[in-house]
Amino acid sequence: MKNPVLEIKDLRTSFNIKGDYYAAVDGVSITVHENEVVAIVGESGCGKSALALSVMGLHDRKATKLEGQVNFAGQNLLTLTRSRLDKVRGKDIGMIFQDPMTALNPLAIIGRQIEEPMDYHMKLSASEKKKRTLELLRRVGIKNEQRVYEQYPHELSGGMRQRVVIAIALACDPVLLLADEPTTALDVTIQAQIMDLMKELQNQMKTGIILITHDLGVVAEMADRVVVMYAGEVVEIADVKDLFENPLHPYTRSLLNSIPSNMEGKEKLHVIDGIVPSIQNLDRKGCRFAPRIAWIPEEDHEEIPEMHEAAPNHFVRCSCYKTFYFPEDRVGEKEYVATNS
Amino acid sequence: MSLLTVNDLKVHYPIRGGFFRKVVDHVRAVDGISFELQPGETYGLVGESGCGKTTSGRALIGLNKATSGEMLFEGKDLAKLSRAERRNYTKDIQMIFQDPYSSLNGRKNVLNIIAEPLRNFERLSPKEELLRVQELVARVGLSPESIYKYPHQFSGGQRQRIGIARALALNPKLIIADEPVSALDVSVQAQVLNFMQEIQEEFNLTYLFISHDLGIIQHMCDRIGIMYRGRFVEEGTASDIYNNPQHVYTKRLIAAIPEMNPEKRFEKMHLRQSINQEYQTEYNNYFDKDGRMFDLKRVSDTHSVAML
């Protein structure tokens, strides 16, 4: 068994909205091992970004309540003071942000921005830093690294900027990378390049990666293990192969059926009824996906849904997966009228 | 007869510089594209950002001026008409915009948003107008009381349906949909795409579907034109493009679609690498010495490629 790099145990992140705390991440436990890519998938509002920001301690501490544990290198990141946390993030944990246009400082040259984390975390001379930076730029596939070193972000294309953001995340040899929608802001061909680059780097460096995305295509290309989140909870965890071959939770199955490129030859895409509940309106009792699969009888859900090991290393929440079916597959058998609004 | 025929459409923007800000060069955003739309079909315009697909769509609806070329809508050249004359024809061409958050006026309620095209073109009494708007709102699946609400009270998918209701208000023949779902979540995306297919049948609409997402294009479109740097590199039916891509750029785009089968991911990665190599070695077969695409050449009845 590989060593765990990061253990998230029963993490609960609550935000203060008009005096009350509402949990956006509601009891999530995930373990990331070394050399493993764990993808966290879900629609907007499912809590996946809130989870990443909690691990990095990037939420406003005054308006956020964090409970549970985030164990990394023998310490609980949630209880560290700011200065102790700063010794970890940016060094042992690198972060790749979604939008390379805003993640970089427009007023500083690229070289300066890659060297910045080294200033904090490593004791290097100026020439060593520069050597290391040029090396990093080459590693992320930038060929004219001498020139790019001196350039400003606006002089680079979106794909090049994302490469620079990755170089910054890798600057201090992290053991864990957090990538929050690393390819969402990019064109398809550039997305493919960045995905291939990340796969290659991961093969070389053996880092653990948490990949946060809403794009199941990216998951299928990159991940080893997949965590599906819905309304702040984990609803399914499985190896990537199992998840795509044999998805169990109704939410996972619905998501897969709503992707056009996954539905070749089929006329209609599956539509998930209703909307993702906001954290204030969320009914926290019972199966949280139940309102959106109203044709499944109430007794098929559990009162307090738990994670079940349905197959080896394949976990799924609530028992409703056992009887779940798509109404469009059983036309005539059971009357069910979809309501779209 | 085809509904819309575009012949050698060009949209160039001047670059000014030097003394007296003279025009020194042009940005050739759209550089001579030609295609036809048959009534009732969905034509997909695909390409990466900056390839000119949105500019083409906007030129067709008159949001920016075409530099040269013809745009024959039911035989009438839109490019030659004055603004006032054009109004009467553009009634039949409507647009669905990309971002449902910025394309609806936040200070107007749904009634006023959807009634705006009606007020521009049809003289209706307030009562008739209300009735029409109610019909449209019901057709796009929103509740009747929503006509007095404001855009911020709706979710992204609902807003996009308000945008669709506005586009449908004048019973158009052609709808230009510019990335209609790229700002939406997958499940909401499915909802809007299904709905667009439904109303297409019901109102006998023709779509010009502009997108960078090849999965969606494959699902929605009958015929597809692939754009790159302002020109077409390949045009054909969906099966021509996806099963038998000829141009190296098309191959590259298709290889970039993420593989949904995790077991084939390394195969896909190697495919991408070999296509990149082909792009390097056979560059001269696809681009002339100025890096410009060749003109389209027919390879079958439905399929054309820009190759030597």
Image (tube, rainbow, N blue to C red):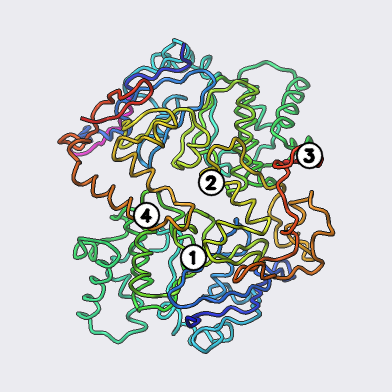
Residue A341 visible within the image:
no
Q: Which residue is mark 3?
A: A337
Q: Give the secondary structure at mark 2.
A: helix
- Establish if A98 lies above or below B160: below
Q: Chain of mark 3?
A: A
Instruction: Name the foreground residue: B137 vs A303.
Output: A303
Q: CA distance from mark 4 to mark 3?
A: 42 Å
Residue A246 covered by magenta stretch: no
Q: Which residue is mark 2?
A: A262
Q: Is residue B130 above or below residue A148?
A: above
Which residue is at a point 36% across and 82% down the rendered structure image? A120
Tell which tag, 1 or 2, sits nearer the viewer. Answer: 2
Q: Label 2 lies in what chain?
A: A
x, y (%) of residue B50?
Answer: 36, 41
Quarter containing the C terminus of chain A: top right
Residue underneath mark 4: B267
Secondary structure under the numbered disc 3 in the rendered image: loop
Q: Is residue A204 above or below residue B282?
A: below
Residue neighbourhood size for the residue with mark 2, other residues' Cα within 10 Å, grouped as few (<14), some (14–19), many (≥20):
some
The CA distance from mark 2 to mark 4 is 18 Å
How packed mark 3 is, by other alpha carbons closer than 10 Å (few <14, some 14-19, many 20 or more), is: few
